[in-house]
Structures are given as structure tokens and as C-alpha cells.
Amino acid sequence: MTDKVTNDPADEPDGVEDIVVGPAGDDEDEQNLAEDFVEIGDADEVPEELREDGPDPSTLPATGLVSEFHDLTSAQAAYLVSHRETSSVSRSPLFYVSALLLGVAVIAALVVGFQRAGAGIGEAPDTLAVVGVEQEQADAFGQQLGLPVVSVEDQAAGEAMLRSGEAGAVYVMDPTGMQQASLLALDRDPQSILDTLNQPIPVDYLEPPAVASVVADPVAWGMAIAVALGTLTLGAALTQNLRTEKRNRLAEVIASTIPARASAWGRVYGLTLLFLTFPVLGGAVLLVGLSIGQRTDLAVALLPALGWFALTALTSAFVVLSAHLWASTSSSRRVRRTGYAVTVVLTLAGVLAPLVLRAQETAMLWLSYVPLSSPVAMPMRYMAGQAEWWEGLAAAGIAAVVGFVIYWLAAAAYQRTLLRGAGRSGLKAVPRKRRSARTSA
Amino acid sequence: MLDVKGLTVTSGRKTYLKDVSFTADSGRLTGVVGLRGSGKTELVRAIMGLIDADEGTIELAGTELGYGDRQNFGYLPSERGGYPRMKVLEQIVYLARLHGMTLGAAEKNAVTLLARLDLSDRAYAQLSHLSGSEVARVDIAAVLAADPDVVILDEPFDGLDAESAEIVFGLLRDHADSGVPVLFTTDKWRMAQEHADDLIVLAHGRIIGEGTFDELQGDERLFVARFATSEDAEAAAARLTEAGAESVDVEDSSISFTAADEATAADQVRGLASLRSFGPRTRDLADLFRESV
């Protein structure tokens, strides 16, 4: 006899209602197993709060896709483009390396600044003017010190020599003889004279600078590096992304969905804002470094220059990135390369010119208003105490106006040439109208 | 329903499209097939409004399309790649949002499409890390994620392996079934023949054939007769031509010709010297194209 069970009712053992029949003991196991399960019944019996919130499957299309739209304005389209550009560039190794280089450059500038301050490197002449002594006495004094010493009749004559650069300092004795003598310098420590005197002596300034030149010079170099590194890195990324869009014909997808000007504006303003990373990073490293070096007084003195630097650098970055957009729109490879090279050269020349011409006050005045050089020249003038508060604002305004003019030309060229290089040339990008909102489940 | 009426596109002396008219019906896959340089890409770009047509109009559901009316057209250009450094999911969501789709819907659709295209495990990979077939599928997902009102694909088979092409066409079929006109171009005759409901055959910027594959085949059928030698085949071809047979073509020791039906063809070959075999031959789209050109 076998225990085989079939679906034939005739095979069903007497007294057994369940079609499943097992060996002895199974009934008990089955009972235990049944106790482990909770009967949930039909879906209708599931409490409302426990039901999954989802669409009715019968109403979903075969594609399984939802279709929810909103009016996409030009500003929103520009935001989407800018978000894509900034998130893509900020994750690129080029951006990381540039930011790292800037940090290293600022730290190097700090070290150099501290060393120069410690070593007392100055550029003042080493001639000492002494007030109210005979020339013979002055000569003897000079012979004793090993310095050229000249006699002047009064302090005014000494100040004239300081301004003309004939003397590095004026030795001023207290008329009452009650107090210590002091040195009068133009705008920086007469370090060689101080070293020769070999005694602590107070120094007064005829034109006291906000920041000593030994610190201001490395800071200005740091600013130049920040502007050059930031604008050239982001400019290269902008150019590369535009070429990718042309090569993969993504430009056609963009042209068929959003206005060309929204695409142009999105990438320029997004990368301009991303550029702020560089001055903010550089400024933060500088201020932290000065604080660690226990030069918080210097950090505070640098703040106005750093603030105006950030503003003028931002507007100048707008100029440079607009120029990069303009240069990269051409369908001619030669024109693109030439435009890119010219933009790079102008940017580097702009940031380096103030460092080269820093001794010439008139040149610095002009450079502080010229976009590209203003982010370096204007803070240098602030650090030297030569600029009024409104001059930084004026320089930033000029750069912004120039930037908008270049951007307008670049956007027009971008719109005109968006589809060139991706097929037949001479095609006009299409202006887009707003679409009506469409929402459906 | 997408209507193309009298489309002519020229540039200088070159004519890319000449008086092209056809209809891509909603709910059907329309394949534009032709050799490279036949004007397929220009046709697609003109439909998308990316180039100005010298003459002709494009209408959607009876309304002529102007600038700005194609925002929810799903468009696949002939080049592949997208943004190489962007993650797959981000890329699809970004392109869907350019159509005005909400973020939530774009993300949901992207996930759904990646699952259907067997790319779920690549959602967070950079596009540059994907294989050519995967990139091609991502591009398809990017086109469909905005649940477009019209789908226009330029050479969608490029970069796709046979299995992926089947998956992609399953998706496109679903879109067509949801009432969307789906138009694609290709130079792969067999793929077009297998997947398109309606075919537009393009040559030198002109339509030389239009309709379903059965309609394109027409009433005449192709028959093949094989002979002992090529000389016999040549002689038989001459006799068939004299007897009024059409499209007679000799290849080695066999000849092909068209006839209305098998009985007519059998009558024509009956009595030919050294006939070895005779029978019908199925013409594919490539044969039809060759005959037309």
C-alpha cells in the first residue's frame, strides 16, 4: 500500500477533509505553523493608515512614467544650466587641484611675509637726515654709524627729503630733551637704518600705510594667483563643456528645449558664483594663518582690502568668463584657439601689471579701475592707504558694466552659432516661448 | 499625429530634402530608412525646428508648429555621449527637467527607465565609465524621461547591441501605444523592417516609398530560378525578358524576376533549358530599395 494522493475524490481517505495528507504528527506541526501566521484577509480589510500610498496600477500608462510639468521660465532654465555647470566643474580634478594650489600659494605668501617682516626687508633709502646739527657733526655721526647722514635745518626740510626719496628717515630729537629721540619715515620702516642704530627707537610715519609693504606685497601676489587660477580654471571648464555639447549634439537638445540665452546666462553666472570659492578660500587661509601667527592686528588691517578684492575679483571673473564664452562660440577652430589664447594672455597681463608697476602711483591709479587688473591694484592701493572707500565700488561697477557688454556680445554669438559645428552651419538657434503647464497623473 | 508637408531644405547648391511629405501617426512606430547621406538627419532636424526649411510645414494634430512649440518633443541626436563626467541618473533628470518636468517626476521616471533598460546598477556611475551600449541606452532613457508628446530619434540603433535594441523597441512600443507618434531614422534595413509599423524610404532627399512593409512589397512577388550554368542563366534571362517578365536580374547561374503570382511565374520558366530549381523568394526592405533606386 502507498500513501500516494491523487485529485480523484475516490482516493480521498475517509474522514479526511483536507486534501493534504501527511505522515503521523503532521497535524500538530501544521497547527503550530498556522499559529505563526497572521491572517490579514482581503486588501479591503487592511487599515487605511497601513496601506501603501501609491497610484492605482490600473490608471498607470504602459510606459510606467508619470507626467508632471510646470512652466519653465528663462530664469529657471538658466538655474538648471548653472546648477549642472557648477556641480560638474566643482567635482572635476582640475577644480580641486586649482583650489589646492591656491591654498598652498597663500600659505607660501604668509611664510614669505613673516620672513620679510622678520628680516626687515624694506626698500627705503639708507640716508639719515638729522635735524638741528652742523654738517660736521652729522658727518662724524655718519662715520660712527657707517651711514650717510645729512644735516637739515628743520623737520619740514627733512620731510621734504623723505618725500623726494633723498632720505630714508629723519632723526628727530625731543626739543625738551626729556624724551627719547625718534625716527620719522615716509610709509615704511627704514630697516637698514634701524639695524645700524642697533637700539630700540620709535618710528613715526609721514604717510602711515594701512598694511606694511612687506606684508602687502605677498598678499597682492596671493590675490593675483587667486584671480588667475580661478578664472583660467573655470574658463577652461566652460570652454570644454561647450565643446562637449557641440560634439555630442547636446546643443541641439538644449536648443529645442530652452532659450539659447538662458543656456548662455546659466553657465556664465553659475561659474562666476563658483569663482567666489577662490577668493573666499584664499582669504580664509590668509586670515587663519595670520591668526595662528598671532598677527590678528594685521588680519584686521587686511579686511577692507580683502573685501574689495572679493567684489572686484567677482566682477572681473564675470568679464573673463563672458570672454571665454564669446571665444568658444566660433565654429572655426583657429578663431576659438586664438580667442582662448588672447583671453588667457589678457587675464595674466591684467593681474600681473599691478605687481610690476606697484611703485608708480599714477599707473596704479589707472590700473585700479581697469577690469582684470583692478582685483589686484585696488586692494594694493587700499593696503597702502591710498584709496578712498568708494573707489573699490567704482572699480567693481566698471568691471560689471564691461562684463555685461562682453556677455551681451557673447550671448548673441552663442545664440547665433549654437547649432554650428553640429551639422550644417549658418543656422539660427530658436527662441523659445513658454509652454503651458501640463499636469497629469 | 505629426504631419510633414512639402518639406524642402537646401543650402547653397545642395538640396537635402525635396518636397518631403508624410504622416507619422499617433500610436505607431514610423521608420525613416535610407542610405547615409539620403537626408534623414536633415529631415529630423527640420522636424525639430533646428534648421529652417525653405518650404513646407510641420503640423502636430493639425496645428502648424512654430518656434517654441517643441519643448516636449523627445529628441535623440545622431551622436551619443551626453556629459561624460555626469552621473547617469543626474543626467537623465537634468535633461527631463529642461522640458519643464518637476524634479520628483523626473527622478521617478529616470529610475523606472533605468530599470527597464537594465541599467539600475549604473545609476550613480559617471557616463564616461559606461560601455558604448550602456551609453546608448542612457541616451534613450534621457529622451523618454520627460514622457514626451512626440518622440524623434535619429539613428537610435547606433551603439546598441541586438539584445539592447529589442529592449529599447519594447519601450518605444509602449510609448507608441500610449498615443504618441514615434519616428526614427535608420540605415539598417532589417531593423526598420522588423520594428516599424510604417516605413518612409528616403533616397537623395526624396521619398521613394511609403507605407507598411506589405504595402511596399506591392502585388508583385520575387521568384528565383537556378540553372546548370551561367550561360544557361543568361539565355533564360533573355527569353524571359522577351516574354515580358519584369525586373529580371542574373547572378551567376540563377536569375530573379518578379511576377504577379507563382502560377504566372511557373508558366514563364516552364520549358527553359537546364532549369534546376524554381521558387519564390521573400524580398526584404533592402531588395525593395535596390529595385526602387
Image (cartoon, rainbow, N blue to C red):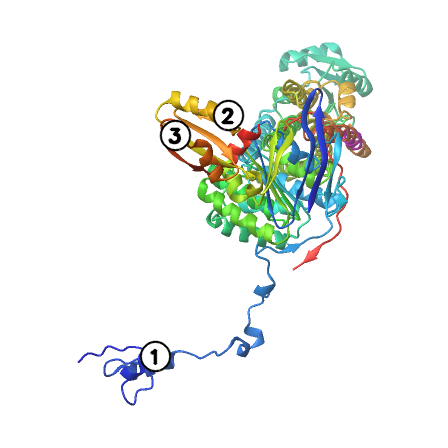
| Residue A52 in the image: above or below residue A170 | below
For the residues bearing labels 1 and 2, Cβ distance under 8 angstroms = no
Mark 1 or mark 3, which is nearer to you?
Answer: 3
Kindly identify which residue carries mark 1.
A33
Expressed as whole percent of the image width and height from the top left, the position of residue A29 reads 29, 81
Give, as a three-letter code, the residue at label 3. Arg
Kindly identify which residue carries mark 2.
B241
Give, as a three-letter code, the residue at label 1. Leu
Expressed as whole percent of the image width and height from the top left, the position of residue A315 reads 73, 33
Q: Is residue A248 magenta?
A: no
Q: Chain of mark 1?
A: A
Residue located farthest toward the left when viewing the structure as drawn: A1
Structural distance between the alpha carbons of marks 3 and 2: 16 Å
Q: Going 22% across and 79% down the picture, which residue do you hit?
A: A3
| Residue A31 in the image: above or below residue A57 | below
Mark 2: give few (<14), some (14-19) or many (20+) Cα within 10 Å: some
Task: Count how many numbered circles sit on residues in the image.
Answer: 3
Q: Chain of mark 3?
A: B
Magenta span: helix, strand or loop, mainly? helix
Q: Which of these two is toward me, A79 or B63?
A: B63
Region in magenta: A397-404
